[in-house]
Amino acid sequence: MKTRFTALLIFFCSLAGVLHAHPQVEHLKEAYKAQGDALFIPLYWLPETRQTVLKHIPDHQNWVGFEMGLWKKLMEEEKLLVIEELGSEFERLGGAKLDTTWKRINDWQHISAQLSLLAAFLDQDEGFLDLAYGDPALRPAFKWITDRRRADFDTKHIGSTFSSGEMATFYPHLTEHLLNAAEHERPACFSRLFARIAEIKSAKADHGSGANPAKPGATP
């Protein structure tokens, strides 16, 4: 009886070990189940996970940034291989480094979502990039694009100079710039952009309604 009990104990301990051997793989699988293919967007762009993801995209030379339509065509087995490999890499990090990696993934998603919402609120990418260039927290990120322009390039309407390929790559670059900035700078940046966009939309609404508010001090 004692021998049988010992054997059962060893079996269940071994089973528990298998179930908990790769917690980060399971964590990634849960995130994939909840988010779908969107999970792979930050994994594709973040420097610490990018090379692992790229290894599993055989035709990446034909991509412009992360192309969701092409990603969806990859076999499910290939996506699960990415998760398995990244999960194993995460487990080797351990402790504070692992916590930092997960935080960067979550922060990247949050920042990207905020930028997308702001651009959608303004309802134009070109105009939003003009606003972003004018913000002190974001302007340094535009060196990525000004370095690709002529020395006498006029930045007044910088948003209209982006090609579609540059646009697809620059938004993630802008996201990473904010990700690497001091955390307290992000809400302040978003607030400034939101306030400026609200002003622009309000002015357009007034213009569309034919409103002509009197100048300060004028007699009604």
Image (cartoon, helix red, strand yellow):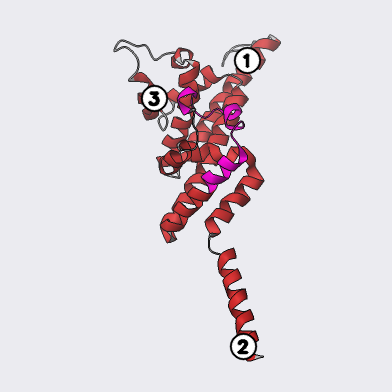
Real-space Cα separation, disc 2 to disc 1, in angstroms: 83 Å
Q: Position of residue 37 (x, y in %)?
A: 61, 38
Q: Was residue 68 drawn as part of the magenta stretch in this picture?
A: yes
Q: Earlier in the sequence, mark 3 or mark 1?
A: 3
Q: Main secondary structure of the magenta part?
A: helix
Q: Identify which residue, 220 or 97, lies in the foreground.
A: 97
Instruction: Characterize the local packing of mark 1: few (<14), some (14-19) or many (20 or more) Cα atoms within 10 angstroms.
Output: few
Q: Earlier in the sequence, mark 2 or mark 1?
A: 2
Q: Is 89 above or below relative to 182?
A: below
> Which residue does the numbered mark 2 point to in the structure image?
3
Quadrant hosting residue 13? bottom right
Quadrant of image for the C terminus = top right
> Which residue does the numbered mark 1 point to in the structure image?
204
The kind of residue tagged 1 is Lys
Instruction: Characterize the local packing of mark 2: few (<14), some (14-19) or many (20 or more) Cα atoms within 10 angstroms.
Output: few
Are dots 2 and 3 in contact, CB under 8 Å? no
Q: Is 212 above or below relative to 80?
A: above
Q: Position of residue 134 (x, y in %)?
A: 43, 23
Q: Position of residue 143 (x, y in %)?
A: 35, 25
Q: Position of residue 166 (x, y in %)?
A: 45, 20
- Select label 3 or label 1 by which is in front: 3
Quadrant hosting residue 122? top right
> Which residue does the numbered mark 3 point to in the structure image?
142
Give the side of residue 133 with respect to residue 211, left or right: left
Q: Residues in magenta? A: 60-83
The kind of residue tagged 2 is Thr
Q: Residue at (50%, 41%) from the top-left corner? A: 43
Real-space Cα separation, disc 3 to disc 1, in angstroms: 27 Å
Q: Secondary structure at mark 3?
A: helix
The kind of residue tagged 3 is Phe
Q: Secondary structure at mark 2?
A: helix
